[in-house]
Image (cartoon, grey):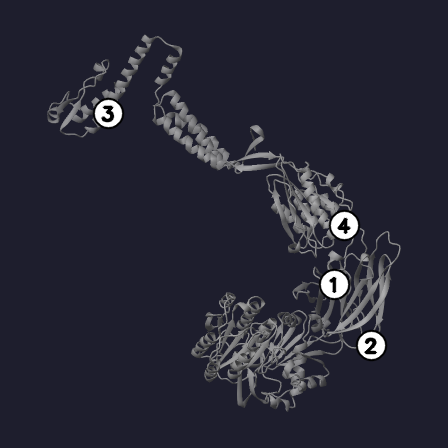
Amino acid sequence: MVNSMFGLQLSFDQPIYLYLGLLLPFFWWLSFRSMRALSGPRRLAAILIRTVVLLAIVFAIAGVQLVWTTERVTVMYLLDQSESIPASRRAQMLEFVTQSVKKHRDANREDRAGVILFGRNAAIEVPPYKDDIPPIRQSADDIGTDATNLAEALELAHASMPDDSRRRIVVVTDGNETLGDAIAVATRLASSGIGIDVVPAPLGDGADVLVEKIDVPSDIRTGQPFETRVVLSNYANPNATTATRGRLTVTRSSGGEEQLLLDDEIELVPGKNVVPLRHTIEQPAPFTFKAKFTPSTSADDVQVQNNEAAAYTYVRGKGRILVIEAADKQGEFALLVEQLRKAELEVVLQPTSALFGSIAELQGFDAVILAGVPRTSGESAESITHFTDDQLQMLVRNVQQLGSGLLMIGGPDSLGAGGWQGTPIEEAMPVDFEIKNSKVVAVGALMLVIDSSGSMDGEKMTLSKAAAREAVKALSPTDSIGVISFDGETREIVPLQPVGGRTHILPMIAKIQTGGGTIMHPAMAKGFRELKKSDASVKHMIVLTDGQTAPDDFQGLTRDMKKAGITVTAVAIGNDADVNLMRQISSAGGGKLFHVLSPKAIPQVVMREARRVSRPLIYENETGFQAKVQLPHAILSGLDNVLPPLTGYVMSTPKDSSLVQQILTSPLPVGQVNPVLAVWQYGLGRTAVFATDGGQRWSTSWTKWSGNEKFYSQLVRWLMRPHGDTGKYSIATQQRGRVVQVIVNALDKDDAYLNFLRFSGSVLDPSLKPIPIDLRQTAPGRYIGSFLADQSGSYFVNVVPESTEAGGITMLATGVNIPFGDEYRVRTVNESLIRAIASAKPQGGIAGVVASPLADEGIGESLKGNPFRGGLGTVGAIQDIWPWLVLASCCFFLGDVFVRRVSVGMGWVYSAWDAIFARDKGELVAVQRLDSLLQNKERVHLQLERERAANKFDGDAITTYTDPSSFAETGARPSPAVVESDSFASKPENGLSYTERLLEAKRKARSQ
């Protein structure tokens, strides 16, 4: 660092290159020798200019920078907008910021100020700039107010503050962070020279009731009374003289059925309150307990988000199986249910019209059977049922993370023929629901004709596009899809083409626009022509419209389509649609009519009808065939290798994985792999596909087979979650803030501790994402692991002993419910965190301060602190100036060339001198005459040089001159004499040749 004037300094990015300056002495010596011909002043000027050029180049190579210190201060205000702070206090924060900047910012110093709002996330509301803070909006929807992430806000402030000023952060918060580590971030910011002040934001004196938890025993046995305790905290107003009154409601639910356990008026004294509740559970199942407190007076409870709590427990019994059957075909699998019950398994039947709503309901079952059900079923718009994406994720996570089993039984509406392609269920199964690399290719063609008139604008068109996208996903890559829209004109949105990878088709569907009238016949006719050209084995058209259309020959068109093997389904949307016309079209076209009153049913209807093109996936043979046993397996233990014949099944392709076990295969069709029964391990659980039906159509001979009951019971038991007596193992959870501890105690049959065991475990969070958990031994027979619970909802924990000493032990399962986040749990200011952040000492400065808290009576005391004060380390601004030095060196180099190549006469200086000081005119004339003679001499010398060079090799004539000094005084130009070259050469002088004489003449001229 080099000091300079005016508080500026020079620094170098690569100072080692300054050693190149040691070459200056050698450079001076070399320059002095090479410029001997120059006069002294010119030589000195040239050397000085060259020195400047060399130094500029050396400084540029070393990365010279201009550094200066600044007193400017940048202050970022971080405002806590989480819901733990009352809305009135959050509004007060905004007023505090505007008044603080207006009062303390130094405009002459060009201080900057900015604002960041934070909750779960942080966002810059006002970037740092040189002016007062404008009015700030109080809405903070984009930052999430259900949590407090002060650490992220500090990081964002650091990134947004300029480096060319002193920096300070002012945090206005209650200090109750629920995400991140603000103290660690504050320490790191202090090492960067950033100071932090904190303005506490009290939560006020309003009373609040917090339902903290429901305490349910982890080891519950059926029929045995036990006690459930509800824990409540009453943050009453300090001036209150009476207890807080309200109603406490406690419910217990399982399998969608809810039972009321308590509904009474209670009184809560300030502090902790425990309400015990004694009851019994008569059957094994998963149970969710909920408690809710409703205050008698709203003033006694300022925050209602923390008035509910929930708990989860699972009472085990014998194995439980959930069988899901189609709502419109209930009873088809009655024989299977009866056989499983005979095998001492508890079976629960659930139609697709009343599906499970949470993964907590699923966890109570050790296996789930999808008994020949399609993803979408129903024969009318009112009866259509549909597995949602969330329900599919629940089924898969119940297997992968919670260890349950999942079995899909085939049928005309199952597997690939049931619209399950491209779903998470297909991913979990040991087979893909399409035929790959096969001579038998299932090819169907679907044409969607969609009304895009003006009346379809809004939700109708949005859901129609969604339906088209779902139809594309439901088809196999070898199937074809086409989309035509119509209003007053017909537009081909997606030309009929194979589905393939699907990604190129979905953007085309998104481009459908609404507007215009409704003319449907040309669109249907175009779709008919496209389908007629296709060689697909199954061709189907779906027409969607919400209005009337111009009359035309629809009967003739649909008759022609039916003759060509094309079926038509009509979807009439709303009451304005021409239902009679759509009924005629569907009836003549061999399809179905769906009158949809709500647009929300459109995707389900289209998905249901899209299954028609998957019929080629079904293989049927009336003469029958026998499935072959490809692999000995526990499922077939004790059964004959010769199985009853089948007449059909749904074709699929085994996954390319060594985990897949093909137990039964079909010999038909010839030339391909045809799995009938395939199983594999998927995460902690197992899945299986039995591609034929349950005896309704293709396996009727199996219902009379003596081994049928044994086959199904062994198949289901192999799939089931490990089940049995937990022995001396126990599992429990304990919540400590945002961290949940999982505690496992392990004893052997003699009550001795089991040590050095290994456990594999996982946790499923409320969003169905897996969280790994590692259990470590902390005491004899005691193992503890933990995970972060930063969302409200149910967390499901599964732990599996991996030690051989634990052989036969079932999977240990439990759950914990987080009813609300910590944001609604704490009702006091976290003073320890506030002091820790403010005490972080910035490098080169002094620690921040904890200002006076915001108060209900005003912000006057809080405004006394000046965040734009000093006490921060010196900050220097840096500017690279080496590019300017490069430019200067180029300019000085031109000056060097000018000094060495151009001789500047000094006569004008003398003239100016004489003019000023009035020298003698005679002397002036003499000087002028002498200057004239010198100029003439210079011109003669230049003329000699030019003519001698021109005639050096001229053989005809040589131009010679007499002594130029003879007419130097007169100023006349010398006259050249021309001498014939031959005579000159033939008359040598003193025996010299022509060339020698020429050189001699040149030397004389130079010497003269």
Q: Quadrant of residue 908?
A: top left
Q: CA distance from mark 3 to mark 4?
A: 98 Å
Q: Earlier in the sequence, mark 1 or mark 3?
A: 1
Q: Nearer the viewer, residue 434 or 922?
A: 922
Which amino acid is tagged 4? Asn
Tag 3 residue: 945
| Mark 4 or mark 2, earlier in chain | 2
Horizontal side, residue 981 vs residue 510: left or right: left
Q: Which residue is mark 2?
A: 223
Q: Which circle's residue, 3 or 4, is located before the other in the chain?
A: 4
Foreground label between 3 and 4: 4
Q: Which quadrant of the figure has residue 977?
A: top left
- Nearer the observer, 831 or 570: 570
Give amino acid for label 3. Glu
Q: Is residue 993 visible?
A: no
Q: Is residue 470 above or below residue 208?
A: below
Amino acid type, mark 1: Pro
Circle 3 packing at 10 Å, graded few (<14), some (14-19), many (20+), is few
Which residue is identified by label 4?
A: 830
Determine the CA span between mark 2 and mark 3: 130 Å
Residue identifier under label 1: 819
| C-alpha separation, residue under disc 1 versus residue under disc 2 | 28 Å
First-in-chain label (1 vs 4) = 1
